[in-house]
Image (cartoon, rainbow, N blue to C red):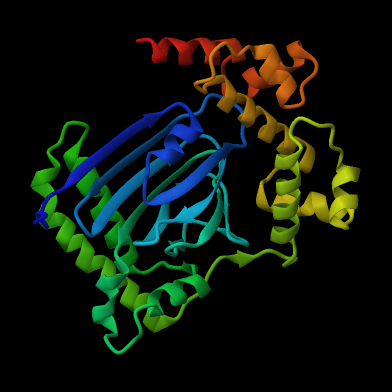
């Protein structure tokens, strides 16, 4: 029988956005770096059987897409935000709390600096709040209300307790010593969610035009399908049936970048994935051509500006890591 008090710990210091994204198994996600410079991120998490608490720090703006784990409800709130963020059709700030609903797709853009804490619970733990409700009640609830504003004491108590617990374990802490604290946090989180439901709050500032998320999503899909081909804003507008102004506003609202700049980040991110892949014998020139850069010096310059290192350095570092 599994020990209900058994705990495990995760500590990640990442220099690549996808390394950071893949380290947290409860959110099946992908990170695209949007701002320029070397990426730096940390993730600290402690888990017991039915609860995980975590703290994530990001020092570049990233666009996060993915699907939440089907067995957990995850809520998260920012401790620090250098600017507003974007979450599933809304602009959010430090007063916002977001809910990653089991099995549901999500979109999140963080600013150039963010620190958030969160907690993941099994939905069955919430049944005690309303035993008469059907088993899928909570999933439907947070699907329809996945963001709310919160300035109350209970939220800040929860944030402080999570941060304190993670700091206490430290880089070499013993997670087995915090089983009782995790159980206390589980009860505090359940009480907090109960208070949110009773108030029926919703939060975050809706985008001025409801169609912006749909336009941006369709444009992004078209970009991903044609990363190695010439693709202009006019091409996208014709394909989507929207105006240049609508496309520009949609991208600025969601990605904080125009469509041309965002397409460049997608191409550079694809190049980085290829340079750090397991494909033997791959060259920088081949990668550049594959993602639509026909001018190698221009590619090297843009890549270094985006990631803080030359493409040849990324390739060499990955090969050294493979054979170390």
Residue 4 found in image quarter: bottom left
- Residue 260 x %, y %: 79, 37
Left or right position of 159 against 168: right
**50 or 212, which lies in front?**
50
Q: Is residue 262 left or right of residue 148?
A: right
Q: Residue at x 34, y 33 (%)?
A: 12
Residue 280 image offset from top left, x and y in percent? 53, 14
Q: Residue at x 75, y 12 (%)?
A: 296
Residue 99, image x, y percentages:
44, 63
Q: Quadrant of the N terminus?
A: bottom left
User: Which residue is pictured at 71% across the width and 48% down the height?
Assistant: 221
Q: Which image quarter: residue 171? A: top left
Closer to us: 17 or 113: 17
Placement of 35 over or under 282, stated as above or below: below
Q: Is residue 81 visible?
A: no
Q: Position of residue 268 (x, y in %)?
A: 66, 28
Is 106 located above or below residue 308 in the figure? below
């Amino acid at each position: 029988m599994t020990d209900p008090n058994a705990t495990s710990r995760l500590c990640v210091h990442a220099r690549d956005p996808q390394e950071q994204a893949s380290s947290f198994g409860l959110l099946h996600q992908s990170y695209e770096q949007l701002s320029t410079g070397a990426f730096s991120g940390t993730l600290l998490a402690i888990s017991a059987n039915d609860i995980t608490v975590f703290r994530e720090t990001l020092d570049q703006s990233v666009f996060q897409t993915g699907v939440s784990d089907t067995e957990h409800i995850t809520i998260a709130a920012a401790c620090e935000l250098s600017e507003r963020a974007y979450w599933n059709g809304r602009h959010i700030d430090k007063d916002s709390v977001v809910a990653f609903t089991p099995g549901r797709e999500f979109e999140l853009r963080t600013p150039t600096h963010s620190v958030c804490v969160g907690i993941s619970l099994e939905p069955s733990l919430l049944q005690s709040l309303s035993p008469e409700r059907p088993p899928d009640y909570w999933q439907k609830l947070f699907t329809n209300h996945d963001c709310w504003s919160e300035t109350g004491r209970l939220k800040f108590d929860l944030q402080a307790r999570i941060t304190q617990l993670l700091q206490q374990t430290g880089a070499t802490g013993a997670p087995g010593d915090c089983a009782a604290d995790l159980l206390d946090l589980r009860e505090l989180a359940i009480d907090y969610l109960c208070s949110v439901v009773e108030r029926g709050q919703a939060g975050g500032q809706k985008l001025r035009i409801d169609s912006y998320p749909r336009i941006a999503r369709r444009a992004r899909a078209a970009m991903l399908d044609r990363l190695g081909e010439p693709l202009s804003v006019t091409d996208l507008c014709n394909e989507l049936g929207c105006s240049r102004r609508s496309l520009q506003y949609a991208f600025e609202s969601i990605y904080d970048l125009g469509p041309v700049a965002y397409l460049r980040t997608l191409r550079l991110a694809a190049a980085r994935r290829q340079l750090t892949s397991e494909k033997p014998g791959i060259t920088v020139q081949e990668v550049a051509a594959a993602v639509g850069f026909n001018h190698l010096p221009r590619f090297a310059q843009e890549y270094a500006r985006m990631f803080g290192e030359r493409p040849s350095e990324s390739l060499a570092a990955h090969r050294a890591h493979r054979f170390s």
